[in-house]
Image (cartoon, rainbow, N blue to C red):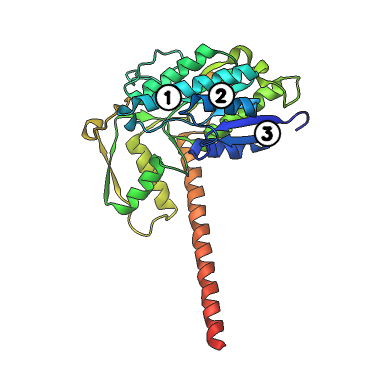
């Protein structure tokens, strides 16, 4: 890339989305991931000081309070991380003339609509987590500046605690898994969210006559706002779990028999936080404004499972190599 280097700061270090963003955005310029203790979202002064010192051209907030059920008993903690911290980040980005990107959730809606939600639909969260994400959306909008809020859903990936990794673990340990079949959404791979974010940054860079490292905030203009960003298609939690087990079976990722996936209604699996029945989001605005669309959830799942299978095979090959070396060393000692 010619011109001044684009300076990107990602808030978040070890989360699944922050990790993917770091890999995907690396070739666009200098990328710095910040988190505790350098930048603590529970300490708003720390946030202001940290961003003021780093002076990014693009500020990406990939940190959040994501423990949906725990938020019911910790609403203040969820609100601080998901609403107050994004507000301060947006304020600092605006001061610097930086592009600010943050991520929201399908849980801002109550799920009562029969069709996919539009960005213009009235939100009505059912739980504290959703309320905190909605408060964050409103706070960032109130600050203004050059901001993009991407609402995504059912995010999963190779790393961390998520539905995919939980099903893979439990399916190899149990004979039967009972999974809700009357809640619908689009399981979205964190890597595809990162890739779509990169596409939009590149789209803005391509539109400007300024060098790539110049202020992309000026290019965004009136397109700032909220955009849905999810995988294509939709499925129930039960359908997603079934597809995960099918993919694992195809790739022989378990030595034993994998669990049966049994459909149940949500009322047979009570949780502290209520979930929306319909979490489907329309991605038409994202495509229309930026020409970006994510692959179907099924296509992405196949890619993720292939990566997991390859990683496991590589680990097995490594262990076999270690055993071969140990055997050779033992034989050498015997000859000696």
Secondary structure category for the residue under label 2:
helix
Tell me if residue 74 can be seen. Answer: yes
Q: Position of residue 128 (x, y in %)?
A: 34, 24
Mark found first going from the N terminus, 1 or 2: 2
Q: Position of residue 132 (x, y in %)?
A: 40, 22
Mark found first going from the N terminus, 1 or 3: 3
How far, Cα to Cα, is label 1 from label 2?
14 Å
Above or below, comparing residue 317 to residue 196 in the picture: below
> Which residue is most to the bottom?
335
Task: Report the residue at 39% width, 15% height from top.
Answer: 123
Q: Is residue 143 found left or right of 57 in the rendered image?
A: left
Q: Crowdedness of circle 1 by 10 Å Cα count: few (<14), some, many (20+)?
A: many
Where does label 1 land, which residue?
A: 80
Q: Is residue 215 found left or right of 258 in the rendered image?
A: right
Q: Which quadrant would residue 129 be assigned to in this image?
A: top left
Q: Crowdedness of circle 3 by 10 Å Cα count: few (<14), some, many (20+)?
A: some
> Which residue is most to the left?
268
Where does label 2 land, which residue?
A: 48
CB contact under 8 Å: marks 1 and 3: no
Q: Position of residue 314 (x, y in %)?
A: 53, 58
Q: Position of residue 243 (x, y in %)?
A: 39, 42
Where does label 3 land, which residue?
A: 28
Query: The C terminus appears in which quarter of the rendering?
Result: bottom right
Task: Report the residue at 47% width, 16% height from top.
Answer: 139
Mark found first going from the N terminus, 2 or 3: 3
Query: The N terminus appears in which quarter of the rendering?
Result: top right
User: Mark 1 or 3, which is nearer the eye?
Assistant: 1
Q: Crowdedness of circle 2 by 10 Å Cα count: few (<14), some, many (20+)?
A: some
The disc at residue 136 is: none
- The answer to which of 318 and 134 lies nearer the viewer is 134
Q: Which quadrant would residue 144 be assigned to in this image?
A: top right
């Amino acid at each position: 890339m010619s011109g001044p280097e684009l300076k990107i700061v990602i808030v978040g270090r070890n989360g699944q989305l922050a990790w993917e963003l770091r890999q995907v955005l690396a070739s666009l310029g200098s990328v710095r991931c910040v988190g505790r203790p350098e930048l603590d979202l529970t300490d708003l002064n720390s946030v202001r000081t940290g961003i003021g010192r780093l002076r990014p051209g693009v500020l990406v907030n990939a940190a959040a309070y994501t423990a949906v059920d725990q938020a019911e008993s910790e609403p203040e903690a969820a609100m601080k991380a998901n609403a107050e911290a994004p507000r301060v980040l947006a304020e600092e980005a605006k001061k610097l003339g930086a592009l600010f990107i943050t991520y929201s959730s399908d849980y801002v809606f109550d799920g009562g609509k029969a069709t996919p939600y539009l960005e213009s639909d009235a939100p009505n969260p059912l739980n504290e987590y959703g309320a905190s994400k909605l408060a964050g959306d409103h706070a960032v909008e109130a600050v203004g500046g050059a901001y993009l809020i991407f609402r995504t859903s059912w995010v999963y990936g190779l790393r961390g605690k998520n539905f995919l990794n939980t099903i893979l673990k439990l399916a190899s340990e149990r004979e039967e898994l009972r999974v809700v079949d009357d809640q619908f959404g689009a399981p979205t791979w964190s890597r595809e969210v990162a890739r779509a974010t990169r596409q939009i940054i590149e789209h803005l860079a391509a539109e400007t006559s300024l060098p790539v490292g110049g202020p992309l905030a000026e290019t965004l203009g009136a397109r700032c706002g909220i955009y849905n960003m999810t995988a294509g298609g939709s499925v129930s939690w039960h359908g997603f779990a079934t597809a995960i087990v099918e993919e694992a079976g195809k790739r022989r990722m378990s030595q034993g028999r994998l669990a049966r996936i049994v459909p149940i209604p949500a009322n047979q699996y009570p949780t502290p936080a209520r979930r929306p029945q319909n979490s489907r989001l329309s991605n038409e605005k994202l495509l229309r404004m930026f020409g970006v669309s994510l692959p179907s959830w099924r296509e992405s799942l196949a890619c993720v499972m292939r990566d997991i299978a390859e990683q496991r095979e590589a680990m097995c090959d490594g262990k076999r190599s270690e055993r071969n070396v140990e055997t050779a060393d033992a034989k050498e000692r015997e000859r000696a």
